[in-house]
Image: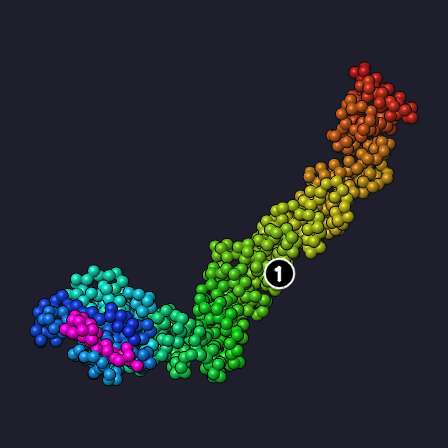
Amino acid sequence: MAWQLHYTSARSGPTGRGGFQFVAETPGLPPETQAAVAPSLTYRPPPEAPLSPGQEELAAFPVAFSYDLLDGRPLLVRTRYLGRDYSGRYGNFLAHAVVAEPAELEGLRPAELWESALWADAPGDGELTGPVDLTPGPESDPEALGEWLAASGEAAYELLARLVGAVAGVLARGHGRVVLISDEAVAVARWIAVVSYSLPLAVTSRLSFVTYSADPDAAHHRVVGTTPGAWAAAHRDAAAAAIDVRPGPFPPAGPPPGRFARTVAGCWRDGDLAGLDALGELALVDPDTALDAALDRAAALLALCRDDPELTGAEEAAAARLLARHGAALPDWVWYNLLPGLPRMGFDLALAIWAWARRTGDTEAADRCGARCAALGLTDTRLRAQARERVPRLELSPAVPARLRPVAVEALHAAADLTEVAEIGALAAEIGVAVPAGEIRSAAAGRARAGAADLPAALAALPGSGTWTGELVAGAVAGLAAADEETLERVLTDAACDALDARPGVDWAAAPAVARRVLGSVGRRRDRRPAVTETLLRLDRVSQVPGDAETGRVLRAVWRAAPSVAECTAVLAACGAGLARHGCLAELPSRAFARLTGPELAAPGTLRLAEQVRAALDGRPSGEDPAVAAARDAAAVLAGAAALDDPRPDRVARELGTLSGVSPDLAESLWTAVARALAARTARFQAELLAAADPPVRARLTRYWLRDRPGRGLGGRGAAAERRNQLVEVALRLRLLGASDPRLVDWARDTAAGRLTYRQLDAHLRDLPELRGALRELAAERRES
């Protein structure tokens, strides 16, 4: 039950003393209630009021009507200024307080009790035994307040919007206050009532207010009414937002009101009380959201239901989050009112309505929403990734993809770049939209020709190798074929070339210039050079321009680094005699042979390559043709290899005679390898070889043997001394065979001149008397000279 208390200055109250005291109360009132209520029972006249008012002037003093919660129970207080007290002094007032149960205010807003019949104009005496009739006062209903606002002019609605926004912000923050400045408390009471009707009913229980306070800085209520004089004397607390509600042509200053505040003002302007009820119903769906945000989101959702064209993207997104998180708690009228706005709806909102349609079994609505989501994904770059993740799971009816085909085609031709074309294609493929291949190719060609093409990114957006990928690549290549050099240079990066090369089935014959750029880039990787060369030559044949200069330039760049034997073998297998069409390719065998050393020259792979080169290129007219040089070098390699194993000195001599005319690098490699191998043969074999060889071959062979000749005075043991002894023996045997090499003889003569060396050589030849005699002759020649 509700309890009442009267508080005023009396000569003698229940306590028997004079002064301010509780003079009447409900029987059974808990003793602690008086102490709890007492801080709210104050009144100080406004500073602009007369100090000694008469009866008529007293009626103009503002009434302080307040509401707050006292330990969870509503506390309502109406305070009127009475003027003189029992002693004749001014300052007396009557405060009538009601402490009610929350259930007693169910369905009521506290502001409705302004001027209710329950308030006493004179203090009671003793017990207040009658029932507390919490009946709203006259003209406190929404209809009467709406008429009052309409009579106040358009500025009143602008004022209301700012007032509602300020109050909602204070309630959301949980601190601060809104100060209403007016000459009349009745105007403040009406504004508080309008604000209360504008907020959800449950929120009004948190809206503490007082219609008048002489000290607005000290008031603890969320909404505080005061007079201009009292506000001018206040310290202006920074936590207070002051709004002058006196009638005037200008709206109050401050930040522009939000969606909820503007919507509320519009509902009052239009007399749309149903809209206010709808706002209240929608605002409390999500209790975990801050009040001001929840109110704005409810207003946005109502605007969507009414197909408001001025709704912003952020507001729509907020409404969509509300639908997605708490859709099951929303009334059905919301969903049915949203559907007409679907053609202009954003992705998240359409998806939320799709979820409701699926939940309720409305297949037709679900398909419409799914189609809207898909269309947005196809046409809006920002939504495409989200659409690819979500739309394929929407389980669209079979007829929907066909309806989306024109949307996809239009989106393709509006795409900003090739990556966007690919993204549209990926989404279209995933939801089953069959776009004609020609449209894909045309869109890709247009973007590539304009240079708006990041090929690696575009191909990464289209996983797999389906129709979309093939047509996109074909279109991009066709577009690049029609592009200028600057565009080709910018688009065909190494990464782009690698991406194109990795795609099988590209018709390079239709775009030879693009192909050469791609293959030239890819061919710089050694492992790809033979395959790239084969493709370039095949392209050269198809283009019917033998020895095409541009192809030759690309091939020279590809084979800038010396080839290996394996690479040459692969190229020769693919090209055969066609190797001669491009000089840079005909040079490859010679370059491969020239970089080999020692055992590599006689390796099986080297010999196979030499045989294949000789078979493919031999018989060409002599001259400076690289193919002729390659055939000659191949023959030299085979001859050098044969010389290494042949047991007959005369045949080895003939084979070495064929090494003339090869490239200098190959000659150096061959002669070095052959000379070192033959140095391991016996002194007899070496001497007979020199004797059988032509003078130029003899001179070159001895030059290589002597190039690393052992030094003198090394003692009689070790490999160096053994090779020295062997070379002197070769010189002696060569002389006995009737032949000579001046350089070798001079070296042997100088070597034998040393006493110690001579003894070592003589010991070496101790079983060969004929050679010992030749040694003595050689040494004597040195002494005589």
Quadrant containing the N terminus is bottom left
Q: Residue at x 23, y 81 (%)?
A: 128
x then y, percent, for residue 277: 32, 80
Q: Quadrant of the C terminus?
A: top right
Query: Which residue is pictured at 18% across the width and 67% down the height?
Result: 214
User: On screen, 726 above or below 600?
Assistant: above
Q: Amino acid at mark 1?
A: Val
| Residue 697 horizontal/vertical position (percent) | 77, 34
Q: Position of residue 434 (x, y in %)?
A: 53, 75
Q: Is residue 183 above or below residue 586?
A: below
State the residue in front, 192 or 44. Answer: 44
Residue sitting nearer the eye, 419 or 252: 252
Q: Nearer the viewer, residue 272 or 129?
A: 129
Q: What range of the chain is rendered magenta?
A: 1-29
The residue that disc 1 covers is 542
Q: Is residue 242 left or right of residue 503?
A: left
Q: Residue at x 40, y 74 (%)?
A: 286
Q: Residues within 10 Å of mark 1 (few under 14, many from 20)?
A: some
Q: Nearer the viewer, residue 525 or 25?
A: 25
Q: In terms of image quadrants, where is residue 25?
A: bottom left
Which quarter of the picture shows residue 181? Answer: bottom left
